[in-house]
């Protein structure tokens, strides 16, 4: 999904979504961004699966105690 930085308001970036709506997002998510910059946001399945695996391992260790 591509999003566009519309403007900055204090600690927030006003981000335009593909459906032409706008949301506030923490400015720190868009380091060095300027108005008009386009960011592509995507889900990383590999990292998601790795994180789930690690959480499952931690949970299993807790259950064994």
Image (cartoon, rainbow, N blue to C red):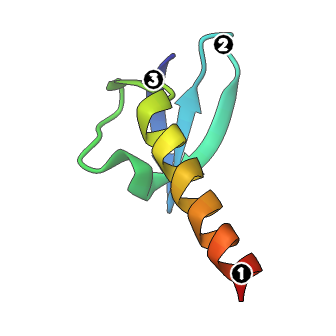
The Cα atoms of the two marked residues, 3 and 2, are separated by 10 Å
Q: Secondary structure at mark 3?
A: strand
**Percent x, y of residue 32:** 23, 47
> In front here: 43 or 50?
50
Q: Is residue 58 left or right of residue 47?
A: right
User: Which is more N-terminal, label 2 or label 3?
Assistant: 3
Q: Secondary structure at mark 2?
A: loop
> Mark 3 or 1, which is nearer the eye?
1
- Residue 44 visible, this angle: no
Q: Is residue 57 left or right of residue 46?
A: right
> Mark 2 or 1, which is nearer the eye?
1
**Percent x, y of residue 20:** 66, 13
Residue drawn at (51%, 28%) of the image? 43
The Cα atoms of the two marked residues, 2 and 1, are separated by 50 Å
Judge whether 63 appears above or below 33 on screen: below
**Percent x, y of residue 65:** 71, 89
| Residue that numbered label 3 is attached to | 4
| Residue that numbered label 1 is attached to | 64
- Residue 4 visible, this angle: yes
């Amino acid at each position: 999904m591509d999003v566009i930085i519309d403007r900055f308001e204090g600690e927030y970036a006003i981000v335009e979504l593909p459906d032409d709506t706008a949301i506030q997002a923490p400015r720190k998510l868009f380091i060095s961004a300027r108005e008009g910059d386009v960011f592509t946001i995507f889900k990383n399945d590999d990292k998601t699966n790795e994180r789930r695996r690690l959480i499952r391992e931690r949970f299993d260790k807790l259950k064994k105690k």
